[in-house]
Amino acid sequence: MVRRTALLALVALSSISMAQISDNFEGGWDQTTWPTYAPSCNQGGTVSLDTTVAHSGSNSMKVVGGPNGFCGHIFFGTTKVPSGDVYVRVWLQLKTALNNDHVTFIIMPDNAQGGDDLRIGGQSQVLDYNRESDDATLPDLSPQGIASSVNLPTGSFQCFEYYLGTDGTMQTWLNGNLISGMTAGPNADNANDAGWTRKSYVPDITGVYFGWEAYSGDINTVWFDDIAIETSRIGCGGPAASGSTTVHSTASGPTTSKPTTTTKPTTTIPPSTSKTTSSTSATQTKYGQCGGQGWTGPTACPPGSTCTYLNAYYSQCL
C-alpha cells in the first residue's frame, strides 16, 4: 500500500508543469516568492519595496543599480516559469533614459546557452535582446537594426511584454505595439537579425529576474509593477492580480497548440527619430561601445582597455 501511494504521488507530480505567477506587490514583497539574485558578484545594487511609486495600487519593486559596473547589478525574480511557451508582462519605469552603453533590466538563465543568460535591455539608445554566450544582439546594431527597435520612455510606467515559444519564436511589445526588430523564429519577418540567426537558437529559460545590470558605469533606478508570467499573452489591461501574489499550476505540461495571440499585430511602434551624437574624440568607459558600422560615439578607450572587434556592428572597450 505504501509503495502504491508513493507511485501515485509521483504520477501526480509528473503531471504538473512549472507554476505560473503574477504579483502587484500590494501585499508587500514576499522574498520567498521573489528572492534577490546577483550572479557572480554584487557591490552596491539594491532591491526594495517602494510604497510611494506604483503603476496600480500603492506599491512597486524598486531596483537601484550600483556604481561598480557589472558588479553593481542586482535582480529579484522567480524560477516559477512555464515549461513550454512563456509570456511575460511587466510594467516598468526608468529614471534615466537608455544611452549608447550596454545595459540589462531582465535576465533569464538559459539551458540553450548552457546556463548563460538571455538578456533584455538596451544598447545604442534602443531596446534589444542580448545572448550572453556569443554576445549576439536582436536586432543587429546597424543603423537599420537600431531604427527597427525603440527607445524606452522615462518618468512613467510602460507596459513591456515578450513571448518565447518552443519553436524558437520570439516576439516583443511595448505598450501593446510589436517591436519589429525584436522578433525572431521560423515565421519572423526581420531583416535585422543576421547576428542572432548565425546559429540555431530556441530559448529554454529556467527563471526570470528583474533588475539592473550595466557593463560600464551606468547607474539607474528601475521600478517594476504588475508582473505576470503565463502560458498565454496577458496584455496591458489591468493590474496583475487583485491581491498580492497569485501562483497557479497547469496540468499535463504545456499545450501543443499555439495561442491565437502569437499572431503578429499589424501595428508596430515607430522608432524614435532623435539620436544623441557623441563626439568621436571623447573617451568611452570600460565595457562601452567604441565602434561598429554606423557608430558615431566615442572610439577611444580608457587606459587598461582596448577597442575590441566583436562583429561588424559592435566593438567594445575590453
Image (tube, grey):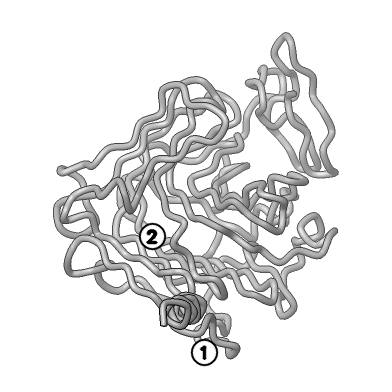
Give how far across and how far down residue 7 sits, in percent: 49, 79
Residue at the (50%, 85%) spot, across then down: 252
Q: Quadrant of residue 221?
A: top left
Give how far across and how far down residue 172 sits, in percent: 54, 66
Number of callouts in the render?
2
Give me the disc on residue 74.
Answer: none
* Residue projecting furthest to the top: 303
Q: Going by the image, does 56 lie left or right of 296?
A: left
Q: Which one is nearer the viewer's eye here, 88 or 109? A: 109
Between the residue at mark 1 and the residue at mark 2, the CA separation in whole angstroms equals 21 Å
User: Earlier along the polypeptide chain: callout 1 or callout 2?
Assistant: 2
Q: Quadrant of the C terminus?
A: top right
Residue receiving disc 1: 260
Residue at the (59%, 69%) spot, across then down: 164
> What amino acid type should be assigned to the residue bearing mark 1?
Thr
Residue at the (77%, 39%) spot, across then down: 314
Task: Classify mark 2: helix, strand or loop.
Answer: strand
Q: Going by the image, does 297 lie left or right of 120?
A: right
> What amino acid type should be assigned to the residue bearing mark 2?
Val
Residue receiving disc 2: 90
Residue 295 visible in rendering: yes
